[in-house]
Image: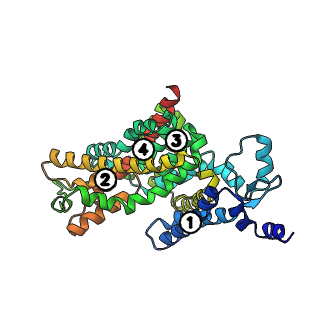
Amino acid sequence: MNHQFIIELFQGISTIFLSTPVIGFTRVILIFLGILLVYLGSKGILEPLLMVPMGLGMATINASIMLLPGGGHGNFFVDPMLSKPDELMYWLQIDWLQPIYTFTFSNGLIACLIFMGIGSLIDIGYILHKPFSSMFLALFAEMGTFLTIPIAILLGLNLKEAASIAMVGGADGPMVLFTSLKLAPHLFVPITVVAYLYLGLTYGGYPYLIRLLVPKKYRGIKVEEKKKVKPISSEVKLMLAVVLCVVLCLLFPVAAPLFFSLFVGIAIKESGLKNILDFIQGPLLYGSTFMLGLLLGVLCEAHLLLDPRVLILLVLGIIALFISGVGGIIGGYIMFFIKKGKFNPVIGIAGVSCVPSTAKVVQKEVSKVNPNAIVLPEALGANITGVITTAIITGLYITVIPML
């Protein structure tokens, strides 16, 4: 009786020992990993707005497993595996995060809201200053989104699953979320978690990749402007945003929500609608990112992440980001030779579209070697073009792959 009373009283602890050894051990590891993410986020090593709620959610969800009627284990946060309408309506009234997950996360809405916020922050004028080099570098920095697919298929994934995890190579969380939701909904949770866990690596890991592949004498190259760059008017930027949005939606209507969200953010910024812009850049973007981090954390429950393919996804995510980083630097070297040594090859890695992190990494690494070398405008051009390129690849994948 006393033994059963203790089990019923401290269910979070007792379910660790009542679970299979693998699940129990994984829960403990995820609790400590969550605590680590909170620490790294609070120190600014990883993105605090995302990692603090994600880490706390991860630790909490794995500590909050309880005994459910019928002998099963579960929690009162969210169940991402619900598919039957009757079950869904019931748990919408029970799990406190289920409505937020169902109505904003599992339908891609939160990805679109974040993308709208990203659009309101970027300046597409950088693309117009150097359109050729920006597009060139962005394409090379997408190598991971292409070359990871055959590797993933060799490791046992099907084409839709392979394309979903390959999108991690674009280093753009909303794109990965949207692609996996459309192509591989059964792996939607682990792929999205892997993607956002790894996005911090672009800021923490790419500096080492730059130092490995680009010698100091090239990292310090200062980009010389032959003529003074004329400022581009808001009207021109607005018209470019409208035209690009319409053209991309005509080509890939299945990804229209993403395109529209990005370009409406840009349009609001260039239209001078300050009150709306303040809302999109502030409460909407920060609130959506915070809730995304919170939901990602509570989705990191041990039994959800113990699908045997999760280890493969972890490996493929690293491969995709590595290949994209290397591809960007290769593109930078090609531009270096095309411009006869008057281009800094480090700029190439900014084409990986984790905006603006990779652009800031580029400038930081260049400044360490040559404080007088300002390459941020060129890096932002490649970075912003990378965002648009990743969106186009997302549209291409979710349009073409289901037909194959």
Q: Earlier in the sequence, mark 2 or mark 4?
A: 2
**Residue 366 visible from this viewpoint:** yes
Question: From this viewpoint, which residue is outermost toward the left?
Answer: 340
Q: Quadrant of residue 293?
A: bottom right
Distance from the alpha carbon under mark 4 to that under mark 1: 29 Å
Numbered mark located on residue 390 in the image: 4
Numbered mark located on residue 261 in the image: none
Distance from the alpha carbon under mark 4 to that under mark 3: 11 Å
Marks 1,2: beta carbons within 8 A: no
Residue 386 placement, left or right of 331:
right
Q: Earlier in the sequence, mark 4 or mark 1?
A: 1
Marks 4,1: beta carbons within 8 A: no
Q: Amino acid at mark 4?
A: Thr
Distance from the alpha carbon under mark 2 to that under mark 3: 23 Å
Distance from the alpha carbon under mark 1 to that under mark 3: 26 Å
- Residue drawn 65% across the image and 66% down it: 60
Question: Residue 339 in the image: x percent, y percent?
Answer: 15, 47
- Label 3 crowding class (10 Å Cα cut-off): few <14, some 14-19, many 20+? many
Question: Residue 389 in the image: x percent, y percent?
Answer: 39, 43
Q: Nearer the viewer, mark 4 or mark 1?
A: 1
Question: Which residue, given by chain and number where applicable, does mark 2 sit on?
Answer: 349
Q: Nearer the viewer, mark 1 or mark 3?
A: 1
